[in-house]
Amino acid sequence: MATSRPIAAKRRTRFDLEELLEDAKSQFQGLNPREPGQWPLLPKLAAWGAVLLLAAVAGWFLVLADAVGRLQAEQDREPVLKGDFRLKLNQAINLGELRKQKLQVQEYVNQVEKQLPGKAEMDALLSDINQAGLGRGLQFESFRPGQVRLRDYYAELPISLKVTGKYHDIGAFAADIANLSRIVTLHDMNLTVQAGPREAARSASTAVLTLEANARTYRYLDPNESADQEARRKDAAKGAKK
């Protein structure tokens, strides 16, 4: 008799479970989708669970997914921000040295600017170039200033020149050009010998040579030219934005 009671209890438990399953199954049968308020308890709970699950999934895609994207973007920016921080930290540490370098650069710029003549001084500079050649005994076959070319912050004046003279005199003339107080540069130089090959080989230092070159000198922009250049830069910037 003692062993029959556990067996009976097990059977009742199994039957109760089967009855619960059958009862739960029966609650989902014959449901009217148009009247969910009349559904039994289990279908209502299942419907509420499905709605909550759908809301959670929709919230993930509509809200959290965007937040995750922003978070990833910020995480990707982190190495760049760290690099900028290290750079600025180094600059802050070396601020005194950077200021000294800035002053040195500014002094150099001021020195170079002093070598640029103004518009009124260009005639004197052209005369200095001419006198440098004449002082070395050279003969000018041509000395033609060209059209002024306006750059962003200065004006450039090309000069086409052709001189004849001895080798050392032409070399000294080029050195005198380089040593002028104003900036003058020589470009596209072409040096030819007027004598025949044999005579030139015998006395290269005394042969008559011809130097053709393009000299360039530079000057400040006057206020009107500076205003025109600034207006052109602004127009170019607007065109680039479009």
Image (cartoon, helix red, strand yellow):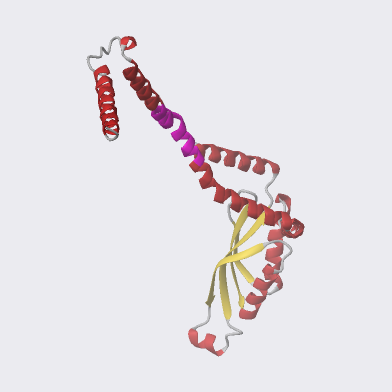
User: Residue, x 53% and y 88% (percent of image)?
Assistant: 201
As drawn, is 118 to the left or to the right of 18? right
Q: Is residue 154 left or right of residue 30?
A: right
Q: Residue furthest left?
A: 30
Task: Say if 78 sits above or below 189 in the image.
Answer: above
Residue 66 on the magenta segment? yes
Residue 26, x across and y down, in percent: 24, 18
In this rendering, the answer to whether 155 lies above or below 38 is below
Q: Residue at x 63, y 75 (%)?
A: 170
- Residue 237 falls inside the magenta stretch: no
Total labels: the figure holds 0
Q: Is residue 58 left or right of residue 84?
A: left
Residue 235 vs 148, above or below: the answer is above
Query: In percent of the image, x 54 and y 46: which residue is there?
Result: 77
Q: Position of residue 115 (x, y in %)?
A: 72, 59
> What percent of the width, then of the height, locates residue 238?
54, 37
Figure quadrant of residue 188: bottom right
Q: Which residues are magenta?
A: 56-71
Residue at 62% x, 54% y: name it: 156
Q: Between 241 and 110, which is closer to the camera in this rendering? A: 241
- Indicate the quadrant where residue 137 lies: bottom right
Q: Which quadrant holds the N terminus?
A: top left
Identify the residue at the far front of this view: 1
Q: Residue furthest bottom?
A: 202
- How would you classify the magenta stretch by its main secondary structure? helix
Vertical relation: 194 (above or below) 36 = below
Residue 150 seen anywhere in this rendered image of the structure: no
Q: Position of residue 141 (x, y in %)?
A: 59, 67
Nearer the observer, 67 or 203:
67
Q: Nearer the viewer, residue 54 or 75?
A: 54
Q: Nearer the viewer, residue 11 or 72?
A: 11
In this rendering, does residue 212 appear at all? yes
